Image: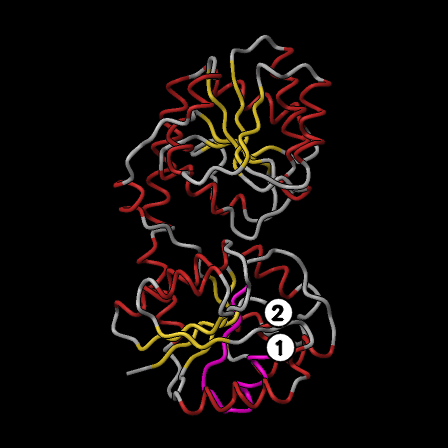
Amino acid sequence: MKHICFFNTIQFWGGGEKIYFEYAVGLKELGYRVTVVCRADSALAKKVKGVGIKTFFISASNRSFLNPVKLLKLKRFFQKEAVDVVMFSASQDLKLGGLAAHLAGLPQIVYRRGLASPIKNRPLNRFLLGKVTTLLIANSNETKRTMRLHLKDAIPEGKIKIVYNGLKIDDFDRHQFKKIEEIERNHSGIILGNAGRLTEQKGHLLLIKVASILKNRNLDFTLFIAGSGPLKSKLQEQIHEKQLEKHVFLLDFVEDIASFMQSIDIFLLSSLWEGFGFVLAEAMVYAKPIVAFDITSNPELVIDGQTGYLAPVDNLKHFADRVEILIQDGKKRSEFGSAGRKRVEVQFEFQQQLKKLEQLLFAKKF
């Protein structure tokens, strides 16, 4: 029985931890021996404990690879447990665990990247990605492009394979809708939605400007933004300054994102870059039409004019124009939403992506 180890020492719960957890459970159900290496106090450790997957606890920082005690501890673990495949996603983990796996002679050492930003051309990165890893996985073509942007001579293009973040569509379909009180209480007209951490990357300040344009056109709409983060106070100031208090509401973090998606009519994504816009796929599962910027991986999810609209990032009027079309045309909203749902079923279904991952991980002769 082949043994795969998912190595993730990030303490908080995010998209990378979620997909690792789902991969671990999925491959265990397929009959593989699975172990998760993580911090004992991490959110991932708590999730894994609940499904009976074996764990090995260790912490890591950017300089942990210089600690010979930790390197030796991991090397012995890999050898004792006869690990066939180890997968990393955080750079700190690849430095420590990748070197230990290399010293242990593991046949398959994998780095999965979910961030569409360039990797610095440093000797250690060249060594880890070019020599230590046997396989690189990107969650989009855009992520693949940025991985090689400064490292083309160190990373052959064929070494990077694409595995999209899959969605468990049946779980979405089984979800029981619960009304979100603030939306029920404050909505008027067409309900626009956005979900994401309130940071510069997510472009919410641009979304406030779009809402101002729509208000000045006397359109009947309400925009609800689900998320928390450091830009909250600045966003609230902009809402007040532009007199949008009856049109834009900040909901803070929404745990039941499925009910949020079911509550809206149109999903707007103002992100300035994305590795894989998982939230777009979530909206499409619930047949919501999309308006987003034509950047990074967004065109891999949204087909312009079929499942939604893509607007130039430097043209907020164009973005607002497309939102206005969908506000005024219920038939188009329905057509785009249905096409988006079908696209997720064909392109981003979880079991399909898990099978692709399985084939890549275990294609090498051990």
- Seen in the picture, residue 190 relative to 173 is either above or below; the reply is above
- Could you say which disc has been placed on residue 142 in the image? none
**Which class describes the residues within 10 Å of circle 1: few (<14), some (14-19), or many (20+)?**
many
Over which residues does the magenta segment extend? 96-113
Residue located at (50% from left, 75% from top): 110
As shown in the figure, which amino acid type bears the numbered disc 1? Lys
Q: Secondary structure at mark 2?
A: helix
- Could you say which disc has been placed on residue 95 in the image? 1
Residue located at (51% from left, 54% from top): 14
**Which class describes the residues within 10 Å of circle 2: few (<14), some (14-19), or many (20+)?**
some
Residue located at (41% from left, 24% from top): 333
Residue 99 image offset from top left, x and y in percent: 59, 84
Residue that badge 2 annotates: 91
Q: Nearer the viewer, residue 350 or 301?
A: 350
As shown in the figure, which amino acid type bears the numbered disc 2? Ser
Residue 1 image offset from top left, x and y in percent: 28, 83
